[in-house]
Amino acid sequence: MNFSAPGNTVVYEEDPAAAAVLLKTPGYSPYVLKRGAGRNAPTTPVQAAAFDPQCLINLAAFRPLQFGAFVAAPGGVGGCNAILFLHERISPAGHHRLVYVSYAPSTVDFQPEFIAGYNYETSAVSPATWTTPLSFAQRFYAIDVLSGYPPTPPLVRVYAGQPDPTDPAHFTIRYQIWGQEDTLDGQLKDDDQVTLTPRHSPQWPTN
């Protein structure tokens, strides 16, 4: 609930050189990408680096976390999913929840938009009490996604999400795609849904 990481901490890195450095650091695991410029283009696997806080891994060992197709510990799609945000948030009605965001981009093509249920998932966990176990808010997705093969590597880099000190329901996640920087605004709602809204979505390269 009180986990924090400095805002300049990279929690997901696709640049091969930068990822190689992070993968030598405790807490990071490989996330293998096999993207090409076309369906028949030969690809060389690239190891991105994904961060998983040890405290969340410990919680998953005690009680499996619900990510749908995703998991918090190593073994997810492509490897270990990156945890972009982890902290307590309080909804406008005063509901205290452990909120986390898991990022798992496609390993063979790419979609720059953050789409719930496709390349990221969120969870709002109700803490356990002496009489009730911890519980997860239900998630329902209806998605239809068009993805493609980027002409140039997107080199996604995501920094550790930060809780808003002035709004207990709000948090931000800073990221870069194709060198374009943007911020996601996260919000915990009273119905335990968590939304992510980009301020200025990165644009697909034209060449």
Image (cartoon, rainbow, N blue to C red):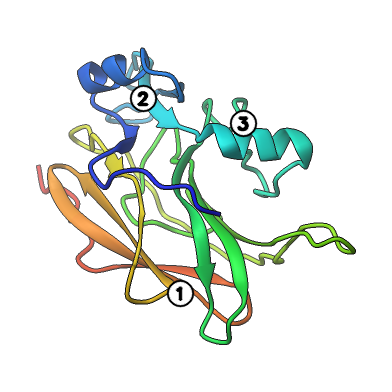
Q: Quadrant of residue 48?
A: top left
Amino acid type at circle 2 is: Ala
Q: Amino acid at mark 1?
A: Ala
Residue at 25% in and 60% down:
183
Marks 2 and 3: in contact by CB < 8 Å? no
- Residue 125 in which image quadrant: bottom right
The amino acid on which the numbered mark 3 sits, given as a three-letter code, is Ala
Dot 1 or dot 3: first in sequence order is 3
Give left or right: position of 17 versus 68: left
| Left or right, residue 19 beside residue 180 | right
The image shows residue 199 at horizontal and vertical percentages of: 23, 69
Marks 2/1 in contact by CB < 8 Å: the verdict is no
| Residue tagged 2 | 48
Residue most toward the right? Answer: 131
- Location of residue 190 with respect to 105 vertically, above or below: below
Q: Determine crowd level at label 1: few under 14, some 14-19, many 20+ residues with C-alpha closer than 10 A.
A: many
Marks 1, 3: nearer the viewer:
1
Answer above or below: position of 67 versus 98: above
